Image (cartoon, coloured by chain):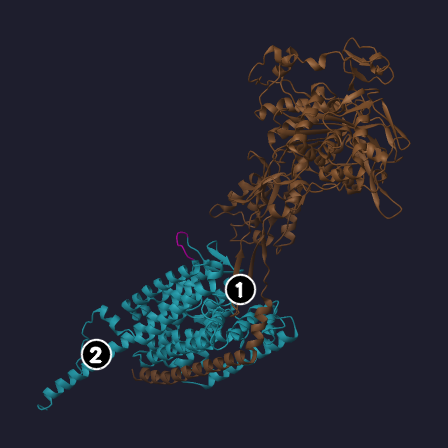
């Protein structure tokens, strides 16, 4: 009766037919728009060199994304240690002679013979999503115990976060990393109360930090960023310069914008406009109209990934999608919040749009994982239908006999 | 299995919740964007416009070149490079191993030995954000000096960064001191000083370009480059070959007479102009002492000159006078900056157009031409000369003592003062003064050079001219003129009466060589008739043939001309100086078909006796000996053996077209003994004949006279002496 029905072997190529069209469209749109904006923001000083580099990264990312879909995300259950190990080792390599320094920070590594630099922190984000998803599956019911969860968080995010803080001195990536892990546990756990308390404590600590940095110099340059955040025009010559120029860009763009390529702020006033502050150039050139369009597309993407996560057939798949969701949502919201001076200035890039090869490559791999989850869901659904149909057919045939 | 299902269900709720929270946050951010735009949009737009700096960059333009008549460059502009150090770029580090700083500093030290590397290293280390530092020793270098550094900088993956070169132009004069007075020089900011450089400054200077950004109607920033326009080129009428010949003999005179009588230069000034009589074009113009255009502020060129000083007058004006000190190295070293500047400015002046002097006997052909033209005398008029004439209380002597009856030709050839005074008297002061204006005495010639002297105060008008003034003016004393006035007027006497405006530039072309303006010879007026001109040519030829200008005749040629010796006026006593003279010779060649006019003035030669016109005639002879063959003018006269030898020494070709018959060379009128009546015998006949030279020598003055004709061969034509009349405006 409970005869196990073997799933019909499906050609892996057919997985491509099951990719979610809406995710593909939104990601494609964001990437193309990102290339256009990078060209617009950097053409004044770098002509097409940044555009070409980014286009190559996007192309490579799409190949890797399709590859991920082809191989399937279930392999990550076995290979998680490889990715995690690569992330740990690469982060450590930053401190060695392979490390590359740029813009006053040492965050990249360069292998001889490879024409581009790698930012290991981006690999760490994928690694932490995969291992957290696995950890949640292993923990099972233990997830209700907030203390065990916190220990698990420490085990997962701890080594990578420490490495990032110590080796690359990159506060914002650490925040994103911890945020992803925390959000994944929150989403996996049926509890609300414990997380509300933790969130409350975090907000309280932040408030204390703000107060301290307002009245003393103890907090160093992060403290000065806080004071500049509260009063960007006053600190316009020093730490608040970038924020002030970003606000000028948004304000001057108005509703309709100045038109593509017409930004004045990118001409030396907004340094490295193609990086974290690219959203302000979008606002200046495309106005509120353009900014809202981009935000809407991001919202669609977030909702679509959320839907894929909800429909996933296994906890592991669901958690992988949740991790990607948390990653993208955190970065989009934080980036726009920084540009609009809603939170203090931290260097968070805008997914798919900001310049950065490693970032776009890793994000596209993550999208590949999400698409793979969606394929699995569709295949399982189809198998389920087939099984039920078969049971029904079998039942139909045998029912008259019983 | 069931548990997992359940947990997925709770997951679904939380994911939904999370997505909703994200959406709400994004909506809040959207509101925030709206607030920024609505509340601060205009304000921020203003801020952006305010912080735009529209600093524009000046792009240098190239100053036009100056060419001679044959297309040889007299002045040119060359790009120069000033080294600028950008410490901010130099201090950037690609990585631990790849740094710009050390390789760049090393190469700087190697390439530019004159740099103080310790100072630069300190500066770059102490001012890491500085973007502009100009070391003093590496300004305005030539391309050759910076070439190797630039190449190293432009190599692929070069570690040489943070140094760049600001471009500008530098003026170079290939000829050095050649035609220095005519060309002039420029300041470092390309402003012409003196000569053609200053007169044609606007034409030579181009329009500087500019690179600037501006906001268009849509408040968009636009960058625009207004390219620089290079200056126009001048094509001068100066012929470098003639100019070189002229300068060679001027400097040779200076050299030979240096320290001859007193310490200092061979003469205070020597000037020479060669003019094309048929166009007014100046073919050569030079004066000595001169200076190096490439190093115009070099005090060494002052050595040997008389020092000038500024004297304040009671009426608030000042005058610049020579103070009698000869500039030696010691004097030069002790000069103050102001004194040096004053003396350099004096040196830079062009003697040929800036200085005025009493022309002396070279004015005689003018006097004769006026009278002939006005009909107050005829070619057959004769004049009695008894050695002196008393006019207005002054006894004005004739240096020839007693010429007896002289024809018009002889009056010019012998340079007879009495005859000239009598000729002037036939005209009266009105005609004389009017005619001086016709010859442009007292007016500017408007030659295209800077600083032509005003002479309107130095000539008389009919109202102010007394009989003595008329008499002295007739032989070129008591009024001042410039060299260019004299030779331009003289050209019109020779060429049939056409007064051409003298000019230095024949053509202006743009940077690509297209002609912008062609300056044609311009006839301003007809001064005398062709008939009178022919007579003047005849009289002037007589001067060289058997008169006072014999020594000016170049071997193989016949030329015409007139010598001049003029007294100068002592600046301190305002009286006629007893030993300072300006001697000159003004000539034209060849005598039968005048092509060029030449005028040489020797101002106060360095000699015990300055009043010897041969200082000028010998220079003219030397110049013409080389210049006439160059101008492809053939020899017409017989050559003596010594002349042939001289030509061979100079490596000049004998260009006689044909050998004239023996009969033509017999010069009957001038060699025959003139019969004099008893009692009317001229004084000179009593002078003893010097066996060496064959001249009669006056035992009192030492002047030499021709044994047969009795005209002055060597000696003073101007004989008014210390107490002679002085034009009051000349001494002011």
* Residue denoted by label 2: A383
Pinpoint residue B296: horizontal percent, then vertical percent: 69, 38
Chain letter, colour cyan in render: A
In the orientation shown, which residue stands out farthest toward the top? B691
Question: What's drawn in magenta, residue-wise?
Answer: A112-116
Secondary structure that dominates the magenta span: loop
Q: What is the drawing colour of chain B?
A: brown
The foreground one among A22 and B141 is: B141
Q: Secondary structure at mark 2?
A: helix
The foreground one among A282 and A79 is: A282
Instruction: Find residue A271 and name its label.
Output: 1
Chain letter of disc 1 in the image: A
- Is A115 magenta? The answer is yes
**Residue drawn at x 35%, y 62% as measured from the top left:** A60
Is there any visible trace of residue B300 in the rendered image?
no
User: Residue B172 lies in what quarter of the image?
Assistant: top right
Residue B474 located left or right of residue B170? right
């Amino acid at each position: 009766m409970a005869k196990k029905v073997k799933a019909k072997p499906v050609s892996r190529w057919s997985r491509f037919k099951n990719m979610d069209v809406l995710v593909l469209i939104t990601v494609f749109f964001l990437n193309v728009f990102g290339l256009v904006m990078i060209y617009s923001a950097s053409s004044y000083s770098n002509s097409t060199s940044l555009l070409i580099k980014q286009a190559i990264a996007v192309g490579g990312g799409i190949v890797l994304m399709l590859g991920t879909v082809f191989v399937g995300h279930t392999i990550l259950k076995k290979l998680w240690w490889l990715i995690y190990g690569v992330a740990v080792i690469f982060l450590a390599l930053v401190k060695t002679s392979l490390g590359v320094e740029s813009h006053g920070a040492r965050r990249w590594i360069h292998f001889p013979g490879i024409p581009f630099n790698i930012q290991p922190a981006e690999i760490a984000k994928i690694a932490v999503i995969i291992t957290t998803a696995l950890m949640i599956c292993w923990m099972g019911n233990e997830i209700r115990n907030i203390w065990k969860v916190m220990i698990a968080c420490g085990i997962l995010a701890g080594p990578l976060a420490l490495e990032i803080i110590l080796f690359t001195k990159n506060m914002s990536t650490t925040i994103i990393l911890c945020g992803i892990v925390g959000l994944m546990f929150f989403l996996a756990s049926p509890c609300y109360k414990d997380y509300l308390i933790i969130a409350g404590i975090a907000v309280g600590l932040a408030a204390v930090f703000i107060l301290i940095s307002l009245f003393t110099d103890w907090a160093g340059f992060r403290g000065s960023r806080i004071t500049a955040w509260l009063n960007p025009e006053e600190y316009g010559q020093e730490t608040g310069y970038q924020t002030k120029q970003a606000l000028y860009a948004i304000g001057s763009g108005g509703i309709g914008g100045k038109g593509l390529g017409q930004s004045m702020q990118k001409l030396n006033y907004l340094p490295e406009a193609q990086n974290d502050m690219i959203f302000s150039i979008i606002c200046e050139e495309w106005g509120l109209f353009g900014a809202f369009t981009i935000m809407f597309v991001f919202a669609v993407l977030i909702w679509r990934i959320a839907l894929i996560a909800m429909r996933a057939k296994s906890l592991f798949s669901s958690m992988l999608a949740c991790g990607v969701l948390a990653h993208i949502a955190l970065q989009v919201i934080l980036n726009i919040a920084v540009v609009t001076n809603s939170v203090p200035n931290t260097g968070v890039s805008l997914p798919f749009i900001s310049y950065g090869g490693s970032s776009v490559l890793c994000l596209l791999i993550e999208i590949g994982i999400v698409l793979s989850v969606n394929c699995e869901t569709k295949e399982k659904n189809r198998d389920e239908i087939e099984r039920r149909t078969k049971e029904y057919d079998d039942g139909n045939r045998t029912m008259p006999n019983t | 299995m069931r548990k997992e299902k359940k947990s997925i269900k709770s997951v679904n709720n939380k994911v939904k919740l999370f997505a909703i929270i994200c959406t709400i946050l994004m909506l809040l951010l959207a509101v925030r964007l709206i607030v920024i735009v609505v509340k601060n949009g205009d304000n921020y737009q203003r801020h952006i416009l305010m912080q735009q700096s529209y600093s524009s960059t000046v792009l240098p333009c190239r100053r036009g070149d100056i060419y001679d008549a044959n297309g040889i460059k007299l002045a040119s502009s060359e790009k120069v490079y000033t080294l600028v150090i950008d410490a901010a770029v130099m201090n950037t580090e690609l990585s631990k191993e790849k740094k710009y700083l050390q390789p760049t500093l090393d190469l700087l030290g190697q390439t530019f030995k004159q740099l103080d590397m310790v100072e630069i290293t300190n500066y770059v280390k102490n001012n890491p954000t500085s973007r502009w530092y100009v070391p003093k020793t590496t300004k305005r270098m030539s391309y050759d000096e910076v070439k190797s550094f630039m190449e190293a900088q432009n190599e692929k993956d070069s570690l040489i960064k943070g140094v760049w070169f600001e471009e500008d132009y530098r003026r170079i004069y290939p000829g050095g001191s050649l035609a220095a007075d005519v060309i002039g020089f420029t300041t470092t900011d390309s402003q012409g000083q003196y000569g053609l450089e200053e007169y044609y400054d606007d034409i030579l200077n181009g329009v500087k370009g500019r690179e600037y950004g501006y906001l268009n109607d849509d408040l968009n920033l636009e960058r625009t480059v207004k390219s620089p326009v290079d200056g126009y080129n001048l094509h001068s009428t100066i012929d470098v070959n003639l100019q070189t010949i002229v300068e060679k003999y001027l400097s040779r005179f200076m050299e030979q007479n240096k320290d001859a009588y007193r310490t200092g230069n061979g003469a205070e000034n020597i000037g020479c102009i060669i003019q094309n009589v048929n166009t007014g074009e100046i073919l050569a113009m030079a004066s000595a002492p001169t200076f190096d255009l490439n190093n115009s502020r070099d005090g060494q060129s002052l050595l040997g000159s008389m020092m000038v000083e500024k004297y304040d007058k009671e009426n608030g004006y000042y005058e610049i006078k020579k103070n009698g000190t000869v500039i030696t190295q010691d004097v030069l070293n002790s000069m103050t900056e102001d004194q040096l500047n004053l003396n350099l400015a004096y040196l830079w002046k062009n003697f040929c157009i800036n200085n005025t002097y009493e022309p002396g006997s070279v004015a005689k052909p003018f006097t004769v031409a006026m009278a002939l033209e006005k009909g107050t005398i005829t070619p057959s008029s004769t004049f009695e000369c008894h050695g002196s004439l008393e006019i207005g209380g002054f006894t004005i002597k004739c240096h020839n003592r007693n010429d007896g009856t002289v024809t018009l030709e002889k009056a010019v050839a012998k340079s007879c003062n009495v005859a000239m005074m009598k000729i002037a008297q036939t005209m009266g002061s009105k005609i004389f003064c009017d005619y001086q204006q016709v010859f442009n005495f007292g007016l500017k010639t408007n030659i295209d050079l800077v600083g032509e002297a005003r002479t309107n105060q130095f000539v008389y008008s009919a109202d102010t001219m007394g009989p003595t003034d008329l008499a002295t003016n007739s032989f070129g004393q008591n009024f001042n003129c410039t060299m260019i006035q004299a030779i331009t007027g003289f050209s019109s006497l020779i060429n049939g009466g056409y007064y051409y405006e003298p000019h230095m530039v024949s053509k202006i072309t743009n940077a690509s060589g297209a002609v912008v303006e062609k300056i044609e010879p311009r006839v301003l007026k007809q001064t005398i008739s062709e008939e009178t001109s022919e007579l003047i040519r005849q009289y002037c030829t007589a001067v060289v043939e058997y008169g006072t200008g014999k020594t000016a005749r170049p071997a193989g040629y016949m030329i015409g001309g007139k010598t001049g010796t003029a007294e100068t006026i002592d600046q301190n006593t305002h009286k006629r100086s007893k030993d300072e003279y300006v001697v000159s010779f003004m000539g034209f060649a060849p005598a039968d078909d005048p092509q060029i006019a030449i005028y040489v003035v020797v101002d106060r030669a360095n000699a015990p006796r300055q009043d010897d016109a041969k200082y000028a005639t010998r220079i003219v002879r030397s110049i013409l000996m080389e210049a006439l063959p160059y101008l492809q003018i053939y020899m017409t006269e017989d050559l003596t053996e010594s002349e042939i030898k001289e030509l061979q020494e100079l490596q000049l070709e004998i260009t006689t077209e044909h050998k004239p018959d023996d009969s033509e060379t017999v010069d009957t009128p001038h060699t025959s003994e003139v019969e004099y009546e008893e009692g009317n015998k001229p004084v000179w006949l009593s002078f003893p004949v010097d066996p060496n030279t064959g001249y009669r020598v006056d035992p009192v003055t030492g002047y030499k006279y021709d044994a047969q004709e009795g005209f002055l061969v060597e000696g003073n034509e101007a004989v008014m002496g210390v107490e002679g009349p002085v034009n009051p405006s000349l001494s002011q």
